[in-house]
Amino acid sequence: MLERTHSMRCLPSLGMSLDITFLGTGSAYPSPARGASALVLRREGQCWLFDCGEGTQTQLMRSHLRAARITKIFITHLHGDHFFGLPGLLCTLSLQSNADPNKPPVDIYGPLGLRSFLWRSLELSHSQLLFPYTVHELVPTRDQCPAEEFKDFSGLDRDEATRQGPPGRVLHLDPGEDSYLLVEDEQLVVRAFRLFHRIPSFGFVLEEKPRPGRLNVQKLKDLGVQPGPLYGKLKSGTAVVLEDGATISPADVLEAPIPGRKICVLGDCSGAPGAGAARLCREADVLVHEATLDDTQQDKAREHGHSTPAMASEFAQLCGAKKLVLTHFSQRYKPAGQGGQGDADVTLLKRQAESALRGQEVTLAEDFMTIEIPLKK
């Protein structure tokens, strides 16, 4: 996998490209060194935004990404450093848009209460968007946070005014899958899973469906099939009938399917109720996990529903993740090489995580870092 930092704008992604760009890697609030939580997953030219802390739109402007390409937004939980930037971003996108009644809506996914927050923010500020948006809310379970912190927001949309807000689905946990199905098409599936934090938090997994394997060209030639349109039909999964009446099915000439890529983005957490998180993240190509405090602060981290490098590494080992990327650093940890004498910097977190993983390389996210995830062969 290739990691790089961008400072220039680039053309839309082509050729099944898939990458993630971090726009904010700090916890609690934006600082001159780090933006608040936000990252963009880019696939086939579309941009999907995960979290939108305060200042995310200015981070987008500084990046190589085009905000106008954002088609979906996923919010992990309703702490301000993860979604206070959302109303402003939507308003700026509207200012840069032209009214188009045929434009598909921007789909926004997040915990119950997000629809009311967005509608009231836009209504109170007399903001009218030139594009439609939908809000799909995830109904949390009570074991996602301490009992005294759980709040039931199911009644927020009952008054007549709020019911005039944006449309969208209310998604309940599928107990059999221990997850929430958000998006599925011919190429990929996106699910949410539960995490434990001070308030209900979620993680998201994008997994591509397997691609057809290579055609065994030599076998086709032996069967008398020359290169041409029949190859395309077989590759697409359609059986073909030859001139002599013989039928060739795709299974006869296709090699094993090629697995798709899997990206997992976790919100703030100190663990996860149930087995859904570890199962869905199994063998993830990239696992993005918070590490707010270092290992010596584990008691404090757990008290506030956060993780340390060792805790993130333990989860990565549990699910067999191929690449662990740490983010959401406390502002007390300075960027590498920027701290003064006696200051702790993020390289401490990297050393602790790699020690827990027995030397496996761990990546520290930084603002504007892009990680490319290549197609599997």
Image: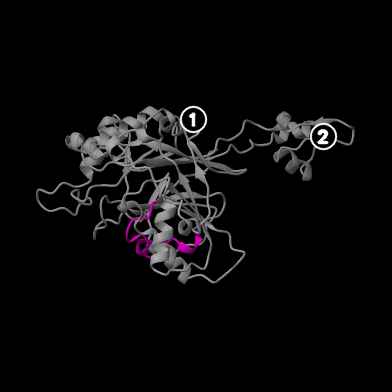
Image quarter of the C terminus: top right
Badge 1: residue crowd in 10 Å (few <14, some 14–19, many ≥20)? few
Query: In the rendered structure, which segment of residues is drawn in magenta?
Result: 49-70
Q: Residues within 10 Å of mark 2 (few under 14, many from 20)?
A: few
Picture coordinates of residue 7, whole percent (x, y)? 37, 62
Residue 8 visible: no
Q: Amino acid at mark 2?
A: Gly
The one of 317 and 127 positioned closer to us in this rendering: 127
Residue 310 appears in the rendering = yes
At 50% from the left and 33% from the top, the residue drawn is 174
Seen in the picture, residue 92 relative to 202 is either above or below; the reply is: below
**Amino acid type indicated by mark 1:** Pro
Instruction: Check disc 2 and report the residue beneath it.
Output: 224
**Residue position for label 1:** 175
Can you give x and y, in whole percent of width and height, for residue 47 in the image?
48, 55
Given residues 30 and 126, the one toward you in this image is: 126
**In-front residue for pair 369/115:** 115
Q: Where's residue 232, x and y in %? A: 73, 43
Tell me where residue 27 appears, x and y as whole percent: 27, 50
Rendered position, 369 above or below 139: below
**In what element is the residue under mark 1?**
loop
Of the 4 image quadrants, the one containing the N terminus is: top left
